[in-house]
Image (cartoon, rainbow, N blue to C red):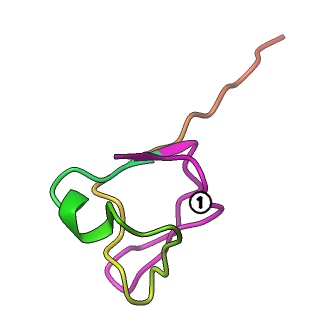
Amino acid sequence: MQLNMFKSIKNDRMIQSVEPDTCFYIQNYAAVIAKKSLDLTVDPPPDLAIEIDKLTRI
């Protein structure tokens, strides 16, 4: 399951938050598939979060 709706993801086990461009639920797919919205204080975080930084050199 792919999601593109997160602004920032952070939990107690993370050193810093991420602002992913896209997220994927793999292992926790069954826990979130039927939900229309997610509450990360209750629902599991995504299994994979991809953040792309594009740097331009002059």
Residue 24 on image: x %, y %: 35, 47
Q: Which segment is the magenta one?
A: 1-22
Which of 52/39 is in front? Answer: 39
Q: Which image quadrant is residue 32 in? A: bottom left
Q: Give the residue drawn at x 42%, y 73%.
A: 15
Note whether 34 is above or below 43 in the view shown.
above
Residue position for label 1: 6
Q: Residue furthest top?
A: 58
Please indicate whether residue 21 sits to the left or right of residue 1 in the image. Answer: right
Q: Is residue 40 magenta?
A: no
The amino acid pointed to by label 1 is: Phe
Q: Give the residue drawn at x 66%, y 61%.
A: 7
Which of 7/56 is in front? Answer: 7
Q: Give the residue drawn at x 51%, y 43%.
A: 22
Please indicate whether residue 38 sits to the left or right of residue 56 in the image. Answer: left
Q: Is residue 43 visible?
A: yes
Residue 27 on image: x %, y %: 15, 57
Instruction: Please count the marks in the image.
Output: 1
Q: Is residue 9 magenta?
A: yes
Please indicate whether residue 14 sits to the left or right of residue 4 in the image. Answer: left
